[in-house]
Amino acid sequence: MTTIPAPPTTSLAATVGEFAARATLDDVPPEVLERARHLVLDAVGLAFASTAYEFPGVALKALSAFGGAGEQPVLGLPNRLPARDAAVLNGVLIHGMDFDDTHIPAVTHVTAAALPAALAAAVSSGADTRTLLLAYVLGVEVSARVGIGGAGGFHDVGFHPTAVAGAFGAAVAAGKVSGLDAAGLTTAQGVVGSMSAGLLEFLADGAWTKRLHPGWAANCGLTAAGFAAAGWSGPGAVYEGRFGLYNSHLAGRDTRPDAVADGLGETWELMRTAVKPYPICHFIHAFADAALLLRPEIGDSEITGVRCAIHPVPGKVVCEPPEAKWAPRDEYDAKFSLPYVVATTLLRGRFGLAELADDALADRAALDLAQKVHVTEDADSAFPAAYSGAIEIELADGRVLRHREQVNRGHDERPLSNDEIAAKFAGTIGTVASPAVADRVRAAVLGLGDDTPAAAFAEACRG
């Protein structure tokens, strides 16, 4: 008879497992729970809005070829899928427009993996929304801490931290719902470490892989929790070990593995999660705000040049490769294009979903102005603690306009209020759903945390 070794009790994963196993909803401060509900509200609104695009249909077609129909409702759609497939598609829907929340120091979209994993596990197990909400909060806490441990380095070596860190948060969220004890939750993290991946190569050609990352992380979390429940073993030192996450993914770089377990139950990283005011890469938000602030001063003068200063790590994401950033080939290129966003914002005085439409992408004036944008390294950037942006605009009349946004709007130092999040939700879900549906979804989300079955909540959030 084979004996499965127990994971060590002194590892970082074990500390996380012990915390998650004993945590109850009563341990979470009321303001954290209220913010959590609003982060979920933002995510569900985005899932609905994504249904107007092509990519969810392609994802549904791919997933349907594997498992066919199932019992799990899908956010914003009438379809039902098996649990893991529903989690994948929900992650795609939440993250697909790149308008979802981001934990700033972790550089991680935390809700897009944690919520689909918690929801799928809760519906499968017949749990109530108290369990669902707690699992989601724990998933966010773990995802954020794993991302923080990378010290901003994941992007620099080509890994998407949402995929990497999100898998660990999803494993804890799913494991908590399924009733894993501390050892089981430790094992789930060990198992999911071998599934934790996500490459940034999509930046070269605008491929759709990033849209899949959080949903796949949720799938990995559910799978890992299932293997742990069945008695599989996993390495205990999955974070700090010789071939653990940080030594394998970020070898030779400064990392902070201890951040994974630091402050659990005392510091709530969920409160540092930023909600996006713009449907673009978070690295560009400060530049959009700076452009809007400078725009009234331009008047009738011609812009002869624009200089943007950015930290080199986010600069790789939003300025490389140059041919895709100075002349975006599609809306996904545009979301990650610093020159296009700055030029379009200066011309139109706004940047919303309409600025990603085909007519906007073909706007000759915006493309010509983008060619005048030059990018330099920002020695004063706050990255990764915040996503800074500095703009200098040269005008034909000789004036030079300058503005720096050191801390991006939405950051925990400049958070969007819950009312602003609710207004964003109304705008996103309103693009595809009636006011009655929006009211139904809003009531279901803001009521999270009672004895309502998670299945009933999921049903309320169907399209």
Image (tube, rainbow, N blue to C red):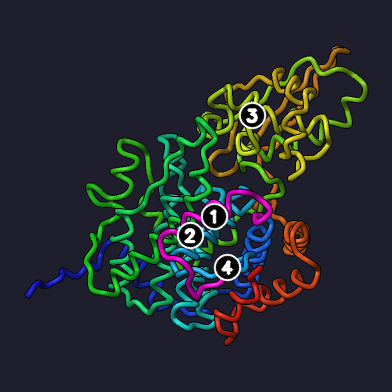
Q: Which residue is mark 3?
A: 328
Which part of the image, by quadrant, shows the N terminus? bottom left
Residue under the image location 59 percent in, 85 percent down: 452
Mark 2 vs mark 4: give the one in front: 4
Query: Comparing marks 3 and 4, which lies closer to the viewer?
Result: 4
Left of 68 or right of it: where is 451?
A: right
Q: Is residue 292 visible?
A: yes
* Circle 2 residues within 10 Å: few <14, some 14–19, many ≥20: many
Q: Quadrant of the C terminus?
A: bottom right
The answer to whether mark 1 and mark 2 are in CB contact below 8 A is: yes
| Badge 1 element | helix
Residue wearing tag 2: 88
Name the element at disc 2.
helix
Asked whether disc 3 touches disc 4, contact meaning CB atoms under 8 Å apart, the reply is no
- Between disc 2 and disc 4, whose residue precedes? 4
Q: Amino acid at mark 2?
A: Val
Task: Name the residue beneath numbered marker 4.
Answer: 79
Structural distance between the alpha carbons of marks 3 and 1: 22 Å
Point 53% across, 48% down: residue: 211
Q: Quadrant of residue 343?
A: top right
Circle 2/circle 4 CB separation < 8 Å: no
Check disc 1 and report the residue beneath it: 92
Upstream in the sequence, badge 3 or badge 2? 2
Q: Separation of disc 3 and disc 2 at Cα? A: 28 Å
The residue under the point 73% across, 21% down is 306
Q: Position of residue 431 (x, y in %)?
A: 76, 57
Give the x, y percent position of residue 180.
34, 76
Range of magenta residues: 50-73
- Residue situated in front as seen by the camera: 93 or 326: 93
